[in-house]
Amino acid sequence: MKFNPFLEAIKTYESGKDIDLIAKEYNLKEVIKLASNENPYGTSLKAKEAIIKNAHLAHLYPDDTMIELKQALAKKFNVLNENIIIGSGSDQIIEYAVYAKLDHMKAYLQCGVSFAMYEIYAKQVGAKIYKTQSLVHDLEQLCDLYQKHKNEIKIIFLCLPNNPLGECLDKKDVFEFIGKIDKDCLVVIDGAYNEFASFKDKNKFIDPQELILNFQNVVYLGTFSKLYGLGGMRVGYGIASQKIINTFYKLRAPFNVTNLSLKAAFAALDDKEFVEKTLKNNFSQMKLYEEFARKNEISYIESYTNFITYFFDKKNSTDLSEKLLKKGIIVRNLQSYGLNAIRISIGTEYENSRFFEEFLQIFSL
Ligand SMILES: *Cc1c(COP(=O)(O)O)cnc(C)c1O
């Protein structure tokens, strides 16, 4: 059977491995997952309560206006309900952006290494991809490449901070950059980890309201999967001008977010204590990963996220991650990004100490 030829060029997204499956496969009592940048402190109590309290509604389709969550987000960000679209993860909004702007005659631009889904969605429509030489975001290179292929490039993805490398641009530079981009080119600001970055450094904070007041051609993406601890519920959102949101709505399937997910997200938004604790512990534990790297002469990029990426020269990252897996520790091997590196999500104090223990043994072999 023949399929859409565009699909032949796609490498399927490699997700973090599942804890239960690994426990069974390697016959392990304990498996620690530091692979998908989930919240190590679990689901916030408020979200858990909301899920249980609303479980009896599972037979009903959700409120498709999603007004409760939309209003809460509108209030939080000081924008209108009409500036918001909610998706099954912010992944879905990336998909809308691609389908709204790209086709096989167009292209998108990103830095050398960034979130894999941009490429996958773009390839689905046969679009061309431009990446800078620089692996991390380099605005000069992005600008040059954009100027060179201006007629083709219809989306620029900026991942701030960047997954899987962890670096982050300053807001002021981002705004200056967007100012140089044609109004017909959509700039996607993927803020999946922006709360982490702005907690660490105020200069990284991107305010969606300020963004859309200044630019008609941007969309800001946020998610409940990381900081808010709801990866399993699949809720994300896009904030943009009404014109962009209305267009994205044409691509949306009805009831794209479940009612329990909407309730959980609404409750999680309100759990300030959980969020504070997550942010504080994340960066105090991050310090241990930095110290560990320096001590063992492993290179890393300063991270503004809830993960850190270790780069190797002599050791092989596939080999290291497979050995870790057998010990019950799941990390993300970055070979598929063409990097001899692993990305480690910052876990709880206990999980991290287990990582250091096992990793050191494997690494010093
Ligand atoms: C996790 C992540 C997302 C979105 O995740 P969802 O679970 O689909 O909301 C988007 N962008 C980046 C860079 C991410 O790391």
Image (cartoon, helix red, strand yellow):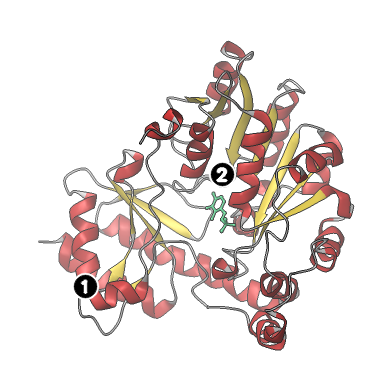
Q: Which residue is mark 1?
A: 327
Which of the image's four quarters has the C terminus?
bottom left
Q: Which residue appears at 63% of the width and 53% of the height?
A: 90
Task: Give the residue at the far left of this rendering.
Answer: 365
Q: Which residue appears at 82% of the width and 43% of the height?
A: 210
User: What amino acid is found at the position of numbered circle 1 in the picture?
Assistant: Lys
- Left or right: 169 with respect to 249? left
- Left or right: 268 with respect to 348? right
Badge 2: residue crowd in 10 Å (few <14, some 14–19, many ≥20): many
Ligand 1 resides in the quarter of the picture at: bottom right
Q: Which residue appears at 21% of the width and 73% of the height?
A: 327
Q: Nearest the camera: 71 or 194?
A: 71
Q: CA distance from mark 1 to mark 2?
A: 32 Å
Q: Residue 168 — which label?
A: 2
Residue 187's spot in the image, x, y percent? 68, 33
In this rendering, the answer to whether 290 lies above or below 94 is below
In this rendering, the answer to whether 87 lies above or below 53 is above
Q: Is residue 353 visible?
A: no
User: What amino acid is found at the position of numbered circle 2 in the picture?
Assistant: Cys
Q: Nearest the camera: 75 or 67?
A: 67
Residue 64's spot in the image, x, y percent? 79, 62
Quadrant of the rendered image containing residue 337:
top left
Residue 293's spot in the image, x, y percent? 31, 57
Q: Nearer the viewer, mark 1 or mark 2?
A: 1
- Helix or strand or loop: what does disc 1 sit on? loop
- Left or right: 218 with respect to 23? right
